[in-house]
Image (cartoon, rainbow, N blue to C red):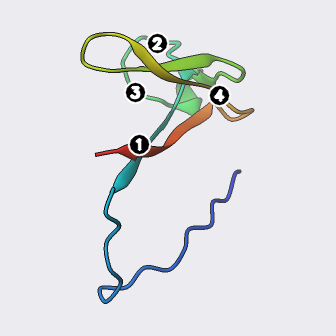
């Protein structure tokens, strides 16, 4: 599995002037069409899938691809 290291953050740190966030998730084939991921029921993660992030008007603002485990992440997004 991927391991992500994040910097330490304490309550005394000054928040950034332009706060950012992340969106992450994973893509899978829902074998039994129940909307939930379960390896025991035949679901499998999908790698090399293009994931588009769209703004409220439907325009693509970022694109990424799932990794070998089906994970994706958009980092550094403005609030």
- Indicate the position of residue 46 as horizontal and vertical percent values: 65, 21
Tag 2 and tag 3, C-beta contact below 8 Å: no
Q: Which structural element holds mark 3?
A: loop
> Of the residues tagged 1 and 2, which is closer to the observer?
1
User: Mark 4 vs mark 2: which is more N-terminal?
Assistant: 2
- Indicate the position of residue 3 as horizontal and vertical percent values: 67, 59
- Indicate the position of residue 45 as horizontal and vertical percent values: 63, 26
Query: How packed is label 4: few (under 14 Cα within 10 Å), some, or many (20 or more)?
Result: some
Give the alpha-carbon distance from disc 4 to disc 2, as whole Å: 22 Å
Q: Which structural element holds mark 2?
A: loop
Which residue corresponds to mark 2?
32
User: Mark 1 vs mark 2: which is more N-terminal?
Assistant: 2
Q: Which structural element holds mark 1?
A: strand
Tag 4 and tag 2, C-beta contact below 8 Å: no
Give the quadrant of residue 51.
top right
Which residue corresponds to mark 3?
36
Give the alpha-carbon distance from disc 2 to disc 3, as whole Å: 9 Å
Which residue corresponds to mark 1?
77
């Amino acid at each position: 599995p991927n391991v992500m290291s994040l910097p330490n953050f304490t309550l005394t740190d000054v928040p950034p002037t332009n706060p950012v966030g992340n969106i992450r998730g994973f893509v899978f084939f829902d074998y039994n069409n129940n909307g939930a991921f379960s390896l025991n029921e035949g679901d499998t993660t999908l790698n090399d899938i293009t994931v588009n992030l769209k703004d409220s008007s439907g325009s693509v603002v970022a694109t990424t691809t799932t990794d070998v485990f089906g994970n994706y992440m958009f980092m550094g997004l403005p609030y």
